[in-house]
Amino acid sequence: MEILRDARKAVKIGRDLLANRRARAALSHRLAQLPPLESNTYKIAVYFADSQVNMYQIRQWYKPLEVLGRTWPVVVLSRGATAATLLFEESPLPVAYVRSVVALEQTLAEQDIRIVFYVNQNTKNFQMFRYGQRWHVFINHGESDKMYMTTNQFKAYDYSLVAGDAAIARLRKVLWDYDFDKRAIRIGRPQADHYSGSLPYTPDERTVVLYAPTWEGDRRAAAYGSIATHGVALVRALLDTGTHRVIYRPHPRSGVVDHAYAAANREIIGMLAAANASDPGAHHVHDTGPELGWQLSAADVAVVDISAMVYDRLASGKPLLVTRPSDPEAQVDTDGYLSACEWLDAADASSIAAHTDRLLHDPETVERLDFWVRRYFGDPAPGAATQRFHDAVEHLMGEWERYAAMHASDESTQLAASASEAPVSAGDLAQSLDTGEDDDDLR
């Protein structure tokens, strides 16, 4: 068994290496045709050190950052070849591929970056933290009650933009000696102001159920995924009614750790295809698209795991069920919304149609949702979160100006040091690339 597991890991590493090299070759060709970034243009950078497997984390911020960029120009700093390839193809924001530390420093020297945003806790974020005289700001890629949301890594950043009162209450339990009033800024959920996308079907009398499970997790404490425990029975039951339409949107990493989880995912996809073949008017959807929005607004009921999807759906103000983790070691924070949510146990998955009907006709649901929406996201009015996001950036820019004035007489260090260095030669750049320190993560 151990030998088989090692063999599978070796095959995966080999595939990742091959994909990485292909991506670099394609990038070299693309970069040779692109003009360099206009110097001294960008005030804000989004630092993304991950590979393509976690692109969903930065995609959530495309539209809010695109709007912000009309006031404060934003550039994406991509460290991985596979992610950079996709970013050049789809990002509405300018992109700089900075695989090596040398390339990163050269880009920083050419731009006036005052705020650096981070959408995840990639270990390579630490390489960016070395550069002072700018604000390092954690904006995350979602809002949830997962243990990820209470990590002490929040302290590594100068500031964090959080959703609302629930996030502050959650962090107060674990962050000691942390200045919440200064360093944690509430902005709500700006993404909710940009829900969009075209429906891949024509609405009819069918009840639409969004099933959006998370991945299986890399440890039992974070085993929130439901595909293998709830998913197959849940989807089969909905398909059998003939009156429901299923939108199945699994996490992009589903099955990367557990082969049984991957098999259950494939089974669900197969069931949807078979149901559509037998009843073309059903229009069940297996959704793998980059856009998240239309699914949340179109679904009459959503079934989600403990993940950011709970709170993306919560922001819509529409009914949802949360799958209860089957692993007893999965850590669940029951002090927040999960203390009052509608749970779905694995044993009840086959009764999903009855649960759906109950939620749609339960008058107490609307009242509970409104309370929790405001606790987690503040004012849910359209545009309110976007305004708070922009206000937060204005505040940070003002603080940058204030501190820059305070230290104007200091000896010049990081802001000017790189700019005064000689340009990087092709030989130096090639040597830096050979170190391998900035390769995509190989999992």
Image: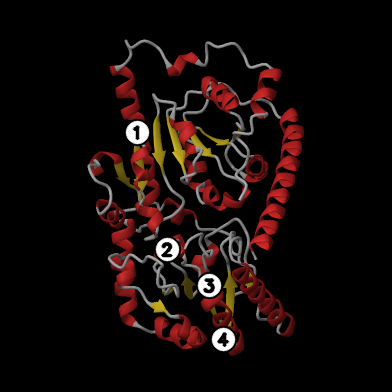
Observer able to see residue 382: no
Q: For the residues carrying marks 2 and 3, which lies nearer the camera in this image? A: 2
The one nearer the camera, 48 or 186, is: 48
- Looking at the rendered structure, the secondary structure element under dot 1 is helix
Q: What residue does disc 4 label?
A: 237
Please name the amino acid that badge 3 sits on: Leu
Are the two marked residues, 1 and 2, in contact with CB atoms closer than 8 angstroms?
Answer: no
Q: Upstream in the sequence, badge 2 or badge 3?
A: 3
Are the two marked residues, 4 and 3, in contact with CB atoms closer than 8 angstroms?
Answer: no
Q: What residue does disc 1 label?
A: 396
Q: Upstream in the sequence, badge 1 or badge 3?
A: 3
- Give the CA separation, mark 4 to mark 3: 14 Å
Are the two marked residues, 1 and 3, in contact with CB atoms closer than 8 angstroms?
Answer: no
Residue that appears at 64% across and 33% down: 436
Q: Is residue 343 left or right of residue 281?
A: left
Position of 152 relative to 227 (above/below)? above
Snapshot quadrant of residue 30 = top right
Please name the amino acid that badge 1 sits on: Leu
Q: For the residues carrying marks 4 and 3, which lies nearer the camera in this image? A: 4
Please name the amino acid that badge 2 sits on: Ala
The one nearer the camera, 403 or 154, is: 154
Q: Upstream in the sequence, badge 4 or badge 1?
A: 4
Q: What residue does disc 2 label?
A: 221
Q: Is residue 49 left or right of residue 414?
A: right
Q: Residues within 10 Å of mark 1 (few under 14, many from 20)?
A: some
- Give the CA separation, mark 4 to mark 2: 29 Å
Q: For the residues carrying marks 4 and 2, which lies nearer the camera in this image? A: 2
Residue that appears at 46% across and 14% down: 416
